[in-house]
Each structure stands twice: as structure tokens, then as C-alpha cells.
């Protein structure tokens, strides 16, 4: 008795969500698990000294990536990613976590990076002054969470995503369940471990 083979996993994936939801970590993990190249939009947006590229520059950088046959991309930057990535997108993963959890992660991550001098986003480093600065990741998350949460709940109905698989995950446990549903990695390299997210995402 013949059986129908399962469909191949998506080859063009974007992960969006609030800062500190774990977009970068999940993106790296999916890239390793599925054997797909991974790009963090923060690395394309931020230059050393926390200088922003701007959306015109980001769109130009994204165009050759979007045209390629396979990729995993983490990050929002909707003014750039929607017109460039979404026409080619196959799977949109939305990390829509509660504000309390994101706040705790943001405070911990910013403090850890400030204390250790850890590099992020092309060599940039966090500073203690940014912990509760208006433009820091914590207060940015507070300002943007409600509007993003409302939009995330309705993304599956957006015409631009009519042919895209949209998966909204509301808890870290949902992320683990998603990873558990995927085929094991064919790579001999160990996949990155899940944990707090990596970089501020202001757009």
C-alpha cells in the first residue's frame, strides 16, 4: 500500500516578534535544523556605533536575499521586509509573547550585556544608560507591544499572506513544540540552544 510522502519543509521563512522574544535564536536553530542559510535583519540594519541603515538601504540589501531559493530571516523591519520578503515568503512564524515575559527578558539581557561587554549587531555594545532609556529595548517594547500584539493576531487574514503559512506562537513552550515537530537535523553540527533573544529590533 503506497503512502503519500509528506510535503517538503518551507524553504523561505521569516520570524517576527517583539524584541527579546527569541527571533534570532529560533532563526539560527531553524537554519541549522533545515539546512537553510540564516540572516538576522539587525545585522543589516545596525552599523558600528548604533548607526541605522534606513529602510531604503535595507531594502536594497534584502533584494538579492529574497530572490535566492532558500533562507531563514529573523526580524521585523516591516517597511522593508513586507514589500521585499513577503512576495517570496512561504512560512511566517510570529512570536507573540506576553508583555511581562518580554519585559523580564529585556531587563535581564540589557543588564547582562552591559555587565559583560558582550558584542551584538556588528560589534555594538549595550550600556547601563540604555537600560531604561527612552530609546532602549525595554521602553521600546512597552511602547510597541499593544499595537504589534493586535496586528499579530490578525496576520493570517492579510491578503499579502494569503498563500503563506502563518504560525503564531504565544508561549516559549509553543516554540519547543514546533521544533519538536520538525524532522531531525541532517547536519552534524549541533543546533543552537533556545534562550533569550539577541538584539534590539526597533522597526
Image: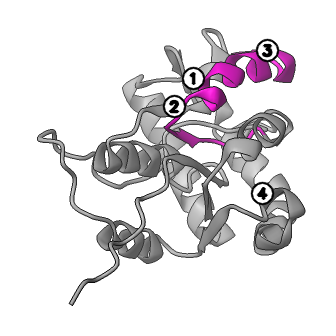
The residue that label 2 is drawn on is 39
Q: Relative to 186, is 147 above or below?
A: below
> Would residue 166 be found to the left or right of residue 140 on screen?
left
The residue that label 3 is drawn on is 57
Q: Are marks 3 and 2 in contact (CB under 8 Å)?
A: no
Residue 181 is a magenta residue: no
The residue that label 1 is drawn on is 43
In the image, which disc is placed on residue 160? none
Q: Give me the residue at 75% from left, 38% from top.
A: 81
Farthest bottom residue in view: 1
Mark 3 or 2, nearer chain start? 2
The residue that label 4 is drawn on is 142
> How far is disc 3 from disc 2 in space, using C-alphas?
16 Å
Mark 3 or 4, nearer chain start? 3
Q: Are marks 3 and 4 in contact (CB under 8 Å)?
A: no
Look at the numbered disc 3 and give the secondary structure of its residue.
Answer: helix
Tell me how the rendering is colored. one colour
Front disc: 1 or 3: 3
Q: Give me the residue at 63% from left, 39% from top.
A: 131
Q: Which quadrant, please, contains the N terminus?
A: bottom left
Q: Are marks 1 and 4 in contact (CB under 8 Å)?
A: no
> How far is disc 3 from disc 4 in space, using C-alphas?
27 Å
Mark 1 or 4, nearer chain start? 1
Front disc: 1 or 4: 1
Q: Residues within 10 Å of mark 2 (few under 14, many from 20)?
A: many
Q: Are marks 1 and 3 in contact (CB under 8 Å)?
A: no
State the extent of the magenta-drawn residues as a range: 51-77
Q: Give the percent coordinates (x, y) of residue 64.
A: 64, 20
Amino acid at each position: 500500500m503506497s503512502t503519500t510522502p509528506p510535503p517538503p519543509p518551507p524553504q523561505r521563512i521569516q520570524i517576527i516578534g517583539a524584541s527579546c522574544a527569541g527571533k534570532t535564536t529560533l532563526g539560527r536553530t531553524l537554519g541549522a535544523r533545515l539546512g537553510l542559510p540564516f540572516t538576522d535583519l539587525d545585522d543589516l540594519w545596525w552599523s558600528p556605533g548604533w548607526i541605522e541603515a534606513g529602510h531604503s538601504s535595507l531594502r536594497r540589501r534584502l533584494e538579492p536575499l529574497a530572490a535566492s531559493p532558500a533562507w531563514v530571516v529573523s526580524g521585523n523591519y516591516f517597511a522593508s521586509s513586507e514589500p521585499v520578503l513577503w512576495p517570496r515568503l512561504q512560512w511566517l512564524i510570529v512570536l507573540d509573547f506576553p508583555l511581562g515575559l518580554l519585559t523580564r527578558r529585556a531587563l535581564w539581557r540589557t543588564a547582562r550585556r552591559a555587565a559583560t561587554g558582550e558584542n551584538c549587531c556588528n560589534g555594538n555594545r549595550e550600556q547601563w544608560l540604555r537600560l531604561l532609556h527612552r530609546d532602549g529595548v525595554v521602553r521600546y517594547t512597552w511602547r510597541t507591544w499593544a499595537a504589534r500584539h493586535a496586528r499579530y493576531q490578525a496576520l493570517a487574514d492579510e491578503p499579502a499572506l494569503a498563500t503563506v503559512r502563518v504560525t503564531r506562537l504565544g508561549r516559549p513552550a509553543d516554540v519547543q513544540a514546533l521544533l519538536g515537530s520538525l524532522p531531525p537535523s541532517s547536519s552534524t553540527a549541533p543546533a543552537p540552544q533556545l534562550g533569550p533573544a539577541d538584539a534590539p529590533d526597533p522597526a
